[in-house]
Amino acid sequence: MTGRLKDKVAVVIGSARGIGRAVAEAFGAEGARLALVDWNEDEGRRTAESFNRSNQECIFIKGDVSNRGDLLRAVDDVIGRFGRIDILCQNAGIFPQTLIEDISEDEWDRVLAVNLKGTFLSVQACLPVMRAQGYGRIVLTSSITGPRVGQPRNAHYSATKAGMNGFMRTAALELAPSGITINAVEPGNILTEGITGGGHDEAFFIAQQAAIPMGRLGTPQEVAHAYVFLASDEAAYITGQSIIVDGGQILPEGAVTP
């Protein structure tokens, strides 16, 4: 690593495991000081403790991304500890698998509250600090599902990720005069605990891999590199954009053949 984020303060929401944890680890390896925010207190604290043992300065804050009060308290805690917020990564998200006719109002509302409202609330909570600094890097976890492709049983998830990209583009216009950029990463099928712990059989993974030209699922660490770039000053002139990290998954017109 090259210290591209040396002494920057990074808030990573949804960081206890999976892509969020990999992003936090990559930020820390590049010299950032970390504030991890997650609803899962046990896993979040274990993650923060493991980073501290690796000499990465890190605090953990329990919080629900869909709750404005939790996010405002998290910002206060970060400012109390570090004095500033340079980077925000909003990675928290949920993706229940349900056909449209079976989605309850409660399930619909919860997916939108976490994935889309949570994005709005997290940006809004950090915005006064970044505006006062005249500097900020915001990176959102979007998806190829919604902005690029569709998938059965993911209507609510797809809607939130497409909405996230729309929010990002308007936010980019509003925030640019304050020296704040906002971009997104759109992962494809990534080998996270959400997939490996989902009770899928071998046939599921074979089918997933067959749809990807590179022939395998991506790793959280491979995705995290895109976040580091967008959070760094190397991306200072990039805003309102997204980077697809999917092994070529969205490219074929039909089934992938050798």
Image (spheres, rainbow, N blue to C red):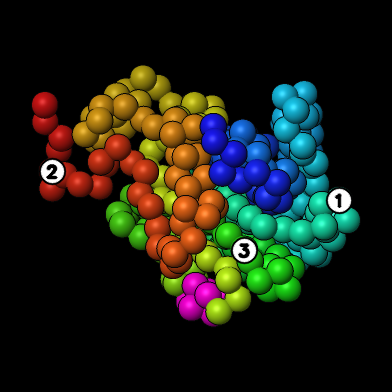
User: Mark 2–mark 1 contact, CB under 8 Å?
Assistant: no
Q: Position of residue 215 (x, y in %)?
A: 26, 27
Q: Residues within 10 Å of mark 3 (few under 14, many from 20)?
A: many
Q: Position of residue 234 (x, y in %)?
A: 47, 53
Classify mark 1: helix, strand or loop: helix
Magenta extent: 170-176
Is-magenta flag for residue 254? no
Amino acid type at image mark 1: Arg
Residue under numbered circle 1: 81
Residue occupying image coordinates x 33% and y 41%: 246
Q: Quadrant of the C terminus?
A: top left
Pointer 3 or 1: first along the chain: 1
Q: Of 184 and 200, which appears nearest the observer?
A: 184
Camera-nearest label, 2 or 1: 1
- Given the current orientation, which residue lies at the most extreme right position? 80
Classify mark 2: helix, strand or loop: loop
Camera-nearest label, 2 or 3: 3
- Given the current orientation, which residue lies at the most extreme top position? 202
Residue under numbered circle 2: 254
Q: Residues within 10 Å of mark 1 (few under 14, many from 20)?
A: few
Classify mark 3: helix, strand or loop: strand
Q: Cα distance, mark 2 to mark 1?
A: 52 Å
**Relative horizontal placement of residue 143, taking residue 22 as reference (left or right):** left
The chief SS type of the magenta part is: helix
Amino acid type at image mark 2: Gly
